[in-house]
Amino acid sequence: MFGVPQSSKSEFLDKARQAREERKGLKEKERAAIHIQALVRKFLCRCRLQKEIRKEVDDYFKASETGTSKRNALSIFKIARKLLFIYCQEDKMRFEKLCRAILASMEVENEPKVWYVSLALSKDLTIPWLKQIKDVLWTCCQLLKNLKPDILQDNKLVTLYLTMLVTFTDTSTWRIVKGKGDALKPALTKICENIMGHLNQKGFYSVLQILLTNGLARSKPSLSKGTLTAIFTLSLRPVIAAHFSDNLLRSFLIHIMSVPAVVSHLSVLTPECTASIQTHDLLRKFILFLSREEQCSDICVCLEGSHTLCLLGNLIHLGYLNEKVLEEEASHFVKDLTDILSYCQRYVSQKKSNLTHWHPVLGWFSQTVDYGLNESMPLVTKQLQYLWSVSVIRTLFSDVLSKKLESQEPTPPPPQPSTSQNNLPVKNLFKRAFQKSASVRNILKPVGGKRVDSAEVQKVCSICVLYQTALSTLTQIRLQILTGLTHLDDLLPKLWAFICELGPQGGLKLFMECLNNDTEESKQLLSMLMLFCDCSRHLITILDDIEVYEEQTSFKIEELITISSFLNTFVYKMIWDGILENAKGEKLELFHSVHGWLMVLYERDCRRRFTLDDHWLRKDLKPSLLFQELEKGKRRAQLLLQYIPHVIPHKNRVLLFRNIVTKEKESLGLIETSSASPHVTHITIRRSRMLEDGYDQLRRLPVNSIKGVIRVKFVNDLGVDEAGIDQDGVFKEFLEEIIKKVFNPALNLFKTTSGNERLYPSPTSYIHENHLQLFEFVGKMLGKAIYEGIVVDVPFASFFLSQVLGHHHSTFYSSIDELPSLDSEFYKNLTSIKRYDGDVGDLGLTLSYDEDVMGQLVCHELIPGGKTMPVTNENKISYIHLMAHFRMHTQIKEQTAAFIRGFRSIINPEWLHMFSTPEVQRLVSGDNAEIDLDDLKKHTVYYGGFHSSHRVIIWLWDILSSDFSAEERAMFLKFVTSCSRPPLLGFAYLKPPFSIRCVEVSDDQDTGDTLGSVLRGFFTIRKKEPGGRLPTSSTCFNLLKLPNYSKKSILRDKLRYAISMNTGFELS
């Protein structure tokens, strides 16, 4: 009955807890209030104190300025201590005044108590003073980081703070030293070293780097001579004080030598600093420091890509300025540069990706790029160019360049077959070459004898590795490097001479062994070969024909023959032995270099011969074996055909081409089989409107229909059919007539070149409304002729054929080299500008081309605004190439593109990769060799009673071989087949086959062979004497219609007259 209810107990406990919490909350509030009050009082006290100190500092400087109070070192020390105690962002002006006060105290004459530095000698104040000066100088450094030297006000502050740093890091300007003598100097020097050590720990070099970069990483430096001198002096002092220790050299290289073009700016603005670099032999110390692999790697890892490049540029510039050190430390210098470039090369990418950045020198780069340095990259590039300057190349390649190329008496060139007229220029060329050059020096052929492990060979190899690494790393200035390396005319011939002497036997065998060895020595030897190939290819590409053949700049003709033979064998072995790719299936850089140089020589030889016949063929390669491997899909055979088809005889390649076409015809069902017949397209053509009707009916056909069988029916203007059945013969005639019409210059679709009258698209073809469609049609018709193996007498300009083959897209292509095939006189005039010794500006040329177009003078600008840009000595080479490119490409760009579009719709461009430009011309127009009468006789078919033993036939062959000249034999062939050249593979491949038919009557009365006419022809029974009739022909059937003449003399005279008048259908 006296118990407490449960609910009352809970309420009581809750109330007690709440009371407890309230009391606790009140205590916390009271504590917080006290704490806040303390903080506020502290803050207010601090503000009051700061205000008092600032007032005191301001009063001090004001009193000093008005002269009411005289400063001394102790008063400056005390005021500085107070200012540093409260220093923040708003005290910059006061700090500036403090610095000026300290510097002013150091300038006072004969008053030691005023000199701020005198406190360092006070027993009680030495340590506080040392701490204070360290704080003051580090504050100067922190302020310097944020200043912009190009702003006038900031520039003044930069000078002030640098003066502070210069003054207190060296005792040379301290009056106390001058006054007290040398006794104090060691102790004070130690103090300076202590100060510098403190600054270095805090990041002194980073401050100097920022300041230098802000002032120099621009096209025009914003640092004055005095400022730059001060910064460089400051950067050098710790290094000297530490006696060039590794730590300080490392900091100097990372922070100072990586500033863009700092050496370049020093040499221009402050030559004294450059002199001090030489005095302290800094370059040698840098070279030796970096020669340790771990040190060099550490430096590169610490630097971002652009800064690594800047370091490289500065080192190269120093090497250029210090030729003596460069000569003495060449091996270490080369190793250092190679290591730095190799590090950068790891991040150089061939293509754009999400992980790459564009760099103006390195190209696509997979490290982060400091775009703020881009403005200074032209200066850095200029520094890098010193690496391939004449003086540096002479120093590095001294062992190679000191070699003398021994002279010898001229030896006669090897005999050449004189059967072909084309060989005559080659003979004359050899004669001139030997007269000019063989008496000057020996022909450089592999002789061997020099040990590859000798110091001399190792040194040259390492230099070649350096330049090869530069070529693959500095991708955007690759051409500049190659141009620099080819500037000395004697470097490449002497390097070839050096290569020839390597190994026990020299040349090929050594390098083939290197390919199979994965040693460092082998890689270096192959790098030497790569460099030689890359540079030589570049040189020959930029030399014109006069320089190569007449002046024989750098290489003599016979040396080019030797080199090309070496390269041809080397590339063949690489492909055939399967050592042109790495484990990933990527082509070796070496292969690209050697193959590129080989193809430049081969294409130059195709354009203008300098080698003998069969020079490029591999005698040890059996075409039958190659074709077997191609059938089996063997990779080495495919690669051989892709890269060096010229090692296979031309006729075998033509056979291969015909096989490829046949296979495609089979796959498309274009060849008649026992089970199926191909689709036949029928077209009707009026002879008077052959081109128009052919164009209208064929242009709409699908490509496969044009590739297939086309039957032609000729009708006259009244629509009446002509007699005759087309068994490919009438189509051949139609094709020949179409091609004859469209390539006639009078139509103005095509023009002829000056001199050798070869065809190329007319720049003014636009007078035809549908000229581009016509060009596409012409391309298809020419493609059809090649597809069917029909030879047509159409001589193309080689520059145009090069474009059809796509050679103008090659990296080795040069417009100027092809220009003689368009206009040899124009080519001579252009190259005379290149050789002009005076000021080209005096000639009054502009970057434009004036042309007479149908009576009107039209000005074509070679580049936008070109007609207002004068041609100067600096841009004359560009002008020559622009002009050549305009004449051969730009002017006929649309026409050529349309022609190629039509041509390639019939002929797969890959099929023609195995042929050179002259060889494609032979594919179009037949062989340029003399007619093989025995081959023609062997493959001739006889009709109308004629046979091989018939006396008229015997007379005919005798007249052709004995009485007719080579020119008349060509005219005879053209009379019968419409083409003066024999088929590439011989007359066995002439379709329809060459035929001779005995005829008794004129063509309009001829009803074909009958039993009577055949018997009369066979037994030489004549209805009447045919002496008044001429031989006629049907070119569509390759058929000669020959009357049964009674005398050989009549046959000879009539035949000669017929072929000279080019009769045929006209008089048949």
Image: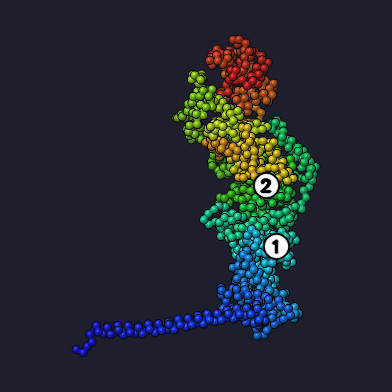
In the image shown, does 348 or 412 lie closer to the viewer?
348
In the image shown, does 7 or 134 lie closer to the viewer?
134
On screen, residue 963 above or below 901: above
Quadrant including the C terminus: top right
- Residue 603, can we see it? no
Q: Quick one: label 1 or label 2, which is nearer the N terminus?
A: 1
Classify mark 1: helix, strand or loop: helix
Q: Residue furthest top?
A: 1024
Is 219 placed left or right of 415 in the picture? Answer: left
Which residue type does callout 2 highlight? Asn
Q: Residue at x 76, y 38 (%)?
A: 432
In the image shown, does 322 or 595 lie closer to the viewer?
322
Q: Residue furthest left?
A: 1
Q: Residue at x 62, y 37 (%)?
A: 858
Q: Residue at x 65, y 53 (%)?
A: 468
Quadrant including the N terminus: bottom left
Question: In the rendered structure, are the residues bearing label 1 and label 2 in contact, judged by CB atoms less than 8 Å apart?
Answer: no
Question: Crowding near pointer 2: few (<14 within 10 Å), some, many (20+)?
Answer: few
Residue 20 falls in image quadrant: bottom left
- Residue pointed to by mark 1: 269
Residue 912 falls in image quadrant: top right
On screen, residue 51 above or below 943: below
| Mark pair 1, 2: CA separation | 30 Å
In the image shown, does 755 or 246 lie closer to the viewer?
755
**Figure label count:** 2
Q: Residue at x 64, y 23 (%)?
A: 972
Which residue type does callout 1 highlight? Leu
Question: Crowding near pointer 1: few (<14 within 10 Å), some, many (20+)?
Answer: some
- Residue pointed to by mark 2: 875
- How far across and down, in percent of the image, does residue 725 sit? 50, 21
- How far across and down, in percent of the image, does residue 1051 sit? 65, 16
